[in-house]
Amino acid sequence: MENLITNSLMGYWTPQELVVNLNIFLNAIGALALGLLVGYERFYRGRAAGMRTYGLVCMSACALTVMSGSPEYWYGGHIAASIKSVDPSRVIQGIITGVGFLGTGVILRDGLSISGLTTAALIWVVAAIGVLVGAGFYSTAIMMALLASGCMMWGTRIENMLPARHAIAVTLHFHKDVELTEGDLTRLMRTQGYEVAHDSFSITLKDQHPEWRFVAVSQGRKKSVSFVKLSESLKQAQDIKDFTIAHARN
């Protein structure tokens, strides 16, 4: 009995098992490095998911992919005869599904603004990089990591050079018994260089004070006024009691 247990345990330390374990470990280290590289931009910008999150996701995806390619060495090779084959695509599907749940956790909605989509997309990208490393596509994984990092580092600069129409979320609180029409509000925002998105309107009544929420889209970078100038204009409007302006990220 004692010899049987000893032989069973030694099965995990045969030269073949050690080579397979070393292969998984080295691939995991490479995937961790690429994940840390991609996650640095999120860490630099102070996002909730930083270098450690991306590194761990990439490393775990890689390890699972590599492991699925060597089922004959599972459990020290003791049940290799009963494991005919493992479909790596099934493992990859499981990885993508699990990462999808993780990405959902970083997406936040605050009123008309939605944030975290870029972070969630990048988590999905590092999972794909980990899978590529695990499948042996090292050069593709490295290039994909560099592309993702470059896109995150310099993508904003490229966006700022191109014509764009940014959106803002506006909340207005009016005084009691104010009779304001949608046309009046549209004209007010147009003087500031913004077009009101009419399908974004939300009107509520709080303590007899009307509250209007809507999204306004700029007519262009040089045509729309800044937040400071827009707030000064809204301050001068006699019907408006108070207001909130924020970027409508979506």
Image (tube, helix red, strand yellow):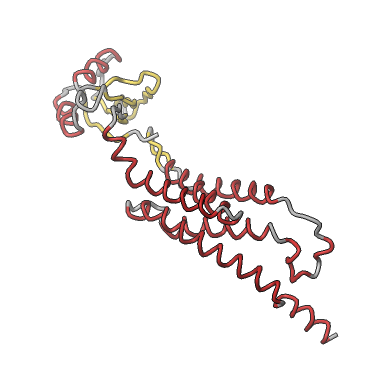
User: Toward which corner of the image does residue 79 lie, by quadrant?
Assistant: bottom right
Measured from the top left, where is residue 164 in percent x and y? 30, 28
Measured from the top left, where is residue 109 in percent x and y? 42, 39
Q: Which residue is situated farthest in the front direction here?
A: 139
In the displayed structure, 240 sits above or below 18; it is above
| Left or right of residue 72, residue 165 in this image | left
Q: Which residue is situated farthest in the bottom direction here?
A: 2
Q: Residue at x 23, y 18 (%)?
A: 190
In-front residue for pair 92/100? 92
Q: Quadrant of the C terminus?
A: top left
User: Toward which corner of the image does residue 206 lie, by quadrant?
Assistant: top left
Q: Count the marks: how many?
A: 0
Q: Residue at x 16, y 29 (%)?
A: 235
In the displayed structure, 183 sits above or below 103; it is above
Measured from the top left, where is residue 212 in percent x and y? 32, 25
In the displayed structure, 49 sits above or below 2; it is above
Q: Residue at x 76, y 63 (%)?
A: 72
In-front residue for pair 21/215? 21
Measured from the top left, where is residue 62 in percent x and y? 58, 57
| Left or right of residue 202, residue 14 in this image | right
Q: Quadrant of the N terminus?
A: bottom right
